[in-house]
């Protein structure tokens, strides 16, 4: 990660919902203020299960290219199968995920229905 280090984030105004789906889980984020990679890592640690789907805001609004790259690579590592980026992922963020994951990505929009069957 080109010399950057992880630091403890004191942000306490974020929430995500973890839904068990058989041997996997779905992670539904709010606005992702804690950082999408922090949310992914913490969810996997809490549930000790792989993530099937990641859904919600990824808080990448106007993120620099290196941040987008880190986010995409960080989501690729645990093998997430479906990605549903929401409002604060922003256009560049959605494009970065689509360019890497192709049809595994479905941007969220008002009225969209998503069904997960274990």
Image (tube, grey):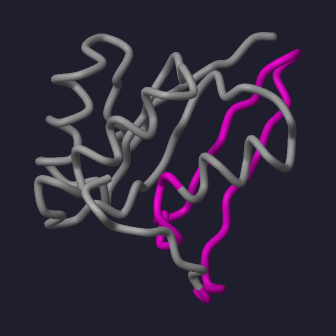
Tell me if 83 is positioned left or right of 46 in this view: left
Residue at 34% of width from left, 25% of height from top? 106
Queried whether the magenta region covers residue 19, the answer comes back as yes
Tell me if 65 is positioned left or right of 118 in this view: left
**Residue 110 position within the rendered picture, expressed as x and y whole percent measured from the top left:** 37, 44
- Residue projecting furthest to the front: 3
Queried whether the magenta region covers residue 56, the answer comes back as no
**Residue 93 position within the rendered picture, expressed as x and y whole percent measured from the top left:** 21, 47
Q: Check the image and report above or below for 31 versus 48.
A: below
Of the pair 22 and 1, the residue shown nearer to us: 1
**Residue 43 position within the rendered picture, expressed as x and y whole percent measured from the top left:** 73, 48
Residue at 49% of width from left, 21% of height from top? 82
**Residue 2 position within the rendered picture, expressed as x and y whole percent measured from the top left:** 25, 56
- For residue 23, which quarter of the picture? top right
Q: Which residues are magenta?
A: 10-37
- For residue 47, which quarter of the picture? top right
Residue at 67% of width from left, 68% of height from top? 15
């Amino acid at each position: 990660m080109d010399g950057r280090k992880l630091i403890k984030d004191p942000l306490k105004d974020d929430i995500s919902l973890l839904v068990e789906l058989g041997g996997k889980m779905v992670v539904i984020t709010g606005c992702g203020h804690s950082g999408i990679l922090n949310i992914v890592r913490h969810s996997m640690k809490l549930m000790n299960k792989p993530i099937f789907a990641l859904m919600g805001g990824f808080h990448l609004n106007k993120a620099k290219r290196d941040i987008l790259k880190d986010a995409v690579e960080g989501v690729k590592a645990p093998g997430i199968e479906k990605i549903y980026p929401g409002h604060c992922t922003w256009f560049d963020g959605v494009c970065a995920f689509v360019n890497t994951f192709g049809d595994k990505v479905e941007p969220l929009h008002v009225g969209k229905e998503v069904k997960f069957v274990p």
